[in-house]
Amino acid sequence: MRTEATPDQVQQVEDEIQRIGCRPFINPGVERKVIAVLGAIDARKGDLVEHFNAFPGVARVELISHLWKLASREYHPTDSVIEVAGVKIGADEVVVAAGPCSIESEAQTIEIARAVKAAGAKFLRGGAFKPRTSPYAFQGLGEQGLRFMAKAREETGLPVVTEVMDTHEVDLVAKYADVLQIGTRNMQNYALLKMVGTLRKPILLKRGLGAKLKDLLMSAEYIMSEGNPDVILCERGITTFEDSTRNTTDINAIPVLKHWTHLPVIIDPSHATGDWRYVGSISKAAVAGGADGLIIEVHPDPIHAMSDGPQSLTPSKFTALMDQLRRVASAVDRTL
Ligand code: PEP
Ligand code: MN
């Protein structure tokens, strides 16, 4: 719409979009209102461009070239900034979430939360519902784990990020979590994506092991098309022929996603490498490469961790890494 378009003119366009059987999405808070027209249509797209061009207040009509519409830069040219409990994700500050792979006990959760907060982390991560490769492996503490995270938030003020694996548990996890994580294995669980799309809490969406970036953005689109605009994308390593590391970090994902989408992009160097000795290097590469944040596994006693000990940093190694990351961030004109 033109910057001087009146609310009536905007409404008229929205009504017309509905009349032709599509859904209007308005990108709010920006000077120029962009209205996305979403839906399957019978009419020729070129005819629709002409049709809407004739409406008063319309500046121009463009076809969004990508299949992800709401996630695209064409719909929302500026970077999206997602605010959680006063922390901004996608702004100048590089934001770090840290914590154990699995929530194991109240004492463990509070101890780690205090340590990562002191080191500068802005979120506590931790799994209460764990997607494990083996059904015989530790499956997480469930709701009790969520309660321990809530206790740690009370003690430290850190907002919490935790995974939801099943549509039946969305309400339960949303009751405790500040950010809900959709894990790698569920990236294309469309029922789950649609359900978290109805929430008013940010979603951390992890890339599937064998998913293209295009697939990741289509999954983000599922969430956004249900009305939740707050999606944080996470590159966490993909399966390749290389087996010297647990997964292969796709560093290319950062500039490609930044090109295609306005959503914040973060890196998970712990699952991407599977080895604590490589976590520092990949974290620094991610910050240098333009990532908006990191999610890092930290455990005070990695050898005895219930899951992912080999890729977990101790609090002291995490603290030392944060000092280095601050300098990398400042080299690329960001803070941390
Ligand atoms: C996790 O973050 O604990 C996790 C299981 O991650 P992913 O889904 O990336 O494997
Ligand atoms: Mn893990």
Image (tube, grey):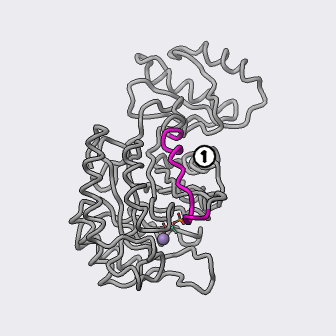
Query: Residue furthest toward the front?
Result: 244
Most foreground residue, 221 or 130: 130
**Horizontal side, residue 250 vs residue 317: left or right:** right
Outermost residue to the left: 118
Q: Which residue is mark 1?
A: 213
Q: Secondary structure at mark 1?
A: helix
Q: Is residue 61 visible?
A: yes
* Residue 27 located left or right of residue 335: right
In the drawing, does residue 118 fall left or right of residue 208? left
Q: From where the camera sits, is residue 198 visible? A: no
Q: Is residue 254 magenta?
A: yes
Magenta stretch: dominant SS? Answer: loop
> Does residue 196 show up magenta in the picture?
no
Answer few, some or many: residues within 10 Å of disc 1's Cα (few below 14, many 20 plus, some between 14 and 19).
some
The answer to whether 251 is drawn above or below residue 205 in the figure is above
Q: Percent position (x, y) of residue 30?
A: 39, 30
Q: How many marks?
A: 1
The percent position of residue 279, horizontal first and vertical second, equals 41, 61
**Magenta segment range?**
243-257
Q: Residue at x 63, y 83 (%)?
A: 135
Q: Which residue sits at x=41%, y=76%?
A: 146
Q: Position of residue 206 (x, y in %)?
A: 53, 57
Q: Please say if 87 is above or below 128.
A: above
